[in-house]
Structure formats: structure tokens, C-alpha cells
Image: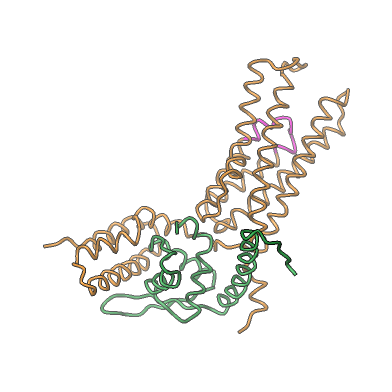
Chain colours: A orange, B green
Amino acid sequence: MEPDLIDAYVDELRRSLARNRRAADVVAEVEDHLRESARRLSGHGVDAVTAQRHTIDRFGDLRVVTRAFATDAGGLAMATPFTRAAGAIGYLAVALWLLAAAARGLDYFVVPESDTRMYAAVSVLAALATIATAVTIAGMLVRSGGVRGVAALIALAAMVLAALMMATAPWAWVFTAVPLTAAAIIAVWRMRAVGMGGRWADLSLVLAWPAGVLLTVVGEAIRIGPRDYYGDYPWAFLAGLVVALLLYCAGLVGVSLRLRTEQPVGEAAVAGSPA
Amino acid sequence: MRGESLKGHLDLLILAVLSQGPLHGYAVIEELRSRSNAVFDLPEGTVYPALHRLEKAGLLSSSWSEETGRRRRTYDLTRKGRASLVSGRSSWQDFSLAVSQVLKGASWNPT
């Protein structure tokens, strides 16, 4: 007796979705699809086993299908007014990051004495830049299916932590790099999952801070420039920060362009729609 | 066409297919393939999560029936879904026109 490949596929899907409360409906719907497809192929003279095999091939790898069902718990993966606004705020974030960097440079290399007003300006600008970036990250999460779910919440929490760290200790950016990078990785991964990835911008966003930290560590190790009062090498930090910010800002511009390009399909349209 | 390229626009395509009337999942996929002359040929199993998302967002409704001893789910556009389709179609036409003009190398006057 020939094996029933559809039964085996459906059983495996049922097992894979065991924790999904909609599993019974999903499995029933998938089985209906597979049986209908195989029936139509058999109607064209294809033998039963070949029809089933072809049907399953067309339906897709079970792991891919299961993952798609498992990750659809979020919202709708569409452009909204918020995603467009988040794109615009991404440009603002870039401007704020560059201003914060300029203020930091002035504070360290130009202002002769420790100036509390300058330090406060750096803190405020860096925190505002992080908050604006957090909105852009939220836009990426919304565009890729919503902010519900563990990964999205981790990304947003990481950005809140980063904003607090920037506000209180902007000089410790090598540590703030960790939550910033974690949020970027999650947001980029989510965007790529819905086909909204961009190769260079994504790489820039994800690798910016690790590259900056690496450059700083190397600079410290090979002792670039003069040593300061704290025993650090400020030129190493400056080089790392410049590289990190340039890459991060390039990534933000790329993401903002993508978010801004799409017209929203949302409530505004519904309100003015024909019956 | 690779699924990755299509996924960002899949929701709008599904709304368009269902604007002709209620269909079950298999028929939606067949329509997508047939209307695109088999260009949109993505793993069929990934279309169902999109249908579920659209239903959850209130753009589609669904109902179950019994067909040859099997449960069958049929999808239909809601009023909200129809409105989103109108808006999405218009946005796509603007975008598509702009891309075509750029690719042709012609100057583009949005007015």
C-alpha cells in the first residue's frame, strides 16, 4: 500500500503547532488545501503518490510553513501613518546623533575646562537622538507585523535602556552599544522576514556600534595619541565613535527612506472609502 | 518570483484577489498564480498566515463549511478591507508609475 504523504505532512504540522491555540483550524485548512490540490492533479492523470509529492513541494518546506504560522501572532505587516512618521523621525535622529557627536567633540577637545553645561548638552542631545531612533525602530517593528511579541518588546526595552544610559553617562557609549545593537538586530531581522530588508543599510545599522567598539579597543591597545588624566586614549574613543556614528546614521537613513517611501494603507483610507 | 520579493506586497495582492468575491485559500493561491501568469509563485503554505493576519486586522472575514467530508474555510473582504484595497492600489499605481519613469530615463513631472 502506498504511503499517504499528506497524512504524514499534516501530522507533523499538528505536532509542530502543538502550542498554538489555533492549531486545529490551521491543520484543517492546510489539509483541505493539500487534498484539493492533489485531487486536481490526479484529475489530470497524475498518479496519486506523485500528485501528493508535487502538492507538498508546492506548499513548502514544513519548517518554513510552521514558522510562518507561528510568527503571525503580530499585527498586519503593512505601511501605516506611524511607519511613515517613524521614517521622518529617523532623519531627525541622524541630525541629533551628529549634533551630539559634535558637542562631545567640543566638550573633550575644545573647551579647556570641564564644563557642566557642555556635558549636559551632550547628555540631552544623545538621549534625544536615542529616543528618536527608538521611534524609528518601533516603526520598523510595526511595518514588520507589530510591536507585540517577546522580540519586539526586548527591542523597545533595549532602546529605553539605551536612552537612560545616554542621558546619564554619554561618555560610556561603548556599553550603550550593547542595547543599541540588540534593538537593531531584532528590528532588521523582523523587516527582512517580511521582505523589507536592505542589504547595506541593514549591515550598517547592525554592525555600526560593534565596529566602533572594536576600533576603540584596538586604538587603546596600540595606544593611539596622548594618554589622558584617566589613563585612556581619547583619540581611540573618538575614532571608534566617529565610525560607529557614521555607520549608524547611514543605516538610519536607509531605513528611514524605506519607511518614508511607502504610502500607508490604514484607518484614514477606511474613513473616506466607498461603501 | 522569489517569495522574499513578494512578501512585502502579498497582503495587497490577496485583498485584490478577494475583491472579486469570496474564495477559499486554495482558490486565492490559484488566482494569484493565474492572474500573474505564474510569476507570483511562492510557497503556498506561506499565504495562509497572511490570510489569518488580514482577518485579524479586520480586512477579511472567514466562514467554515463542510466540503466532501472536509472542513473548508472561505474568506471574504470586509468593508475595511475594500477601503484598504482602494488606498493600497492607488499608492501602488503612483509608485509603479514613478519607478517606470525613472527606469525609462524620462523626466518625471508629478503634476
Furthest-bottom residue in this view: A275
Identify the image quadrant of the N terminus of chain A. bottom left
Q: Is residue B67 above or below residue A213?
A: below
Decide whether the magenta segment is chiefly helix, strand or loop.
helix
User: Magenta includes B73?
Assistant: no
Q: Is residue A193 left or right of residue A177?
A: left
Q: Is residue B3 left or right of residue A120?
A: left
Q: Is residue B50 left or right of residue A104?
A: left
**Quadrant position of residue B81:** bottom right
- At x 82% / y 25%, what residue is drawn? A109
Measuring from the top left, give residue A66's x and y in whole percent.
Answer: 38, 56
**Quadrant position of residue B24:** bottom left
Q: Which of A57 and A148 lies nearest the eye of the viewer?
A: A57
Furthest-left residue in this view: A1
**Quadrant position of residue B29:** bottom left
Q: Is residue A255 above or below residue A179?
A: below
- At x 38% / y 57%, what residue is drawn? A65
Q: Which residues are magenta?
A: A165-177
Measuring from the top left, give residue A6's x and y in whole percent.
Answer: 25, 63
Measuring from the top left, give residue A100's x and y in whole percent.
Answer: 78, 38
Measuring from the top left, give residue A127's x and y in whole percent.
Answer: 74, 42
